[in-house]
Amino acid sequence: MIKKDFLETVGSKIGSIVSSKKDVETVFDAVVDSLVEELTKGEDITFGKLGKFSVKNKKARNGINPKTKAKIVIAAKKAVAFKASKTLKDVLNG
């Protein structure tokens, strides 16, 4: 599913609240911007029925370039992790 399809689905569920597809997109973009902002600060974000987004610090590590077999150092970085809630897992697994 792409963003356009997702926004149409959401719009159809909340049609009486929001007057246009543009309004749905504006709200969605605001939610995504807020998520990114909080994750950038290092804050965890938990949605009860969905799960938890958090930032994980990955340490620098050694690796091998598969093409040349040369050893390289993979730099430390931050990554977003998602852990599904029990409710979501139960729904997915019937």
Image: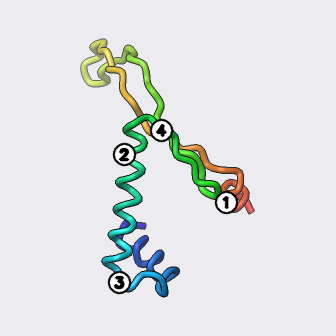
Dot 4 or dot 3: first in sequence order is 3
Name the residue at 39% across, 36% down: 41
The amino acid pointed to by label 3 is Ser
Q: From this view, report whether residue 26 is shown above or below residue 18.
A: above
Quote the CA–CA distance across marks 1 and 4.
Answer: 27 Å
Q: Which residue is mark 3?
A: 20
Q: Residue 71: x, y in percent?
A: 30, 12
Q: Which mark is residue 43?
A: 4
Quote the CA–CA distance across marks 1 and 3.
Answer: 31 Å
Choose between 37 and 71: the one closer to the eye: 37
CB under 8 Å between callouts 1 and 4? no
At label 3, counting other C-alpha atoms closer than 10 Å, the crowd grade (few under 14, some 14-19, many 20 or more) is few
**Which quadrant holds residue 23?**
bottom left
The amino acid pointed to by label 4 is Glu
Which secondary structure, mark 1? helix
Give the mark toward the camera: 1 or 4.
4
Give the mark toward the camera: 1 or 3.
3
CB under 8 Å between callouts 4 and 3? no
Choose between 40 and 66: the one closer to the eye: 40
**Which quadrant holds residue 49?**
bottom right
At label 4, counting other C-alpha atoms closer than 10 Å, the crowd grade (few under 14, some 14-19, many 20 or more) is some
CB under 8 Å between callouts 3 and 2? no
Name the residue at 38% across, 56% down: 32
Which secondary structure, mark 4? loop
Query: For the view shown, which residue lies furthest in the left direction?
Result: 68
Q: Which residue is mark 1?
A: 92
The amino acid pointed to by label 1 is Leu
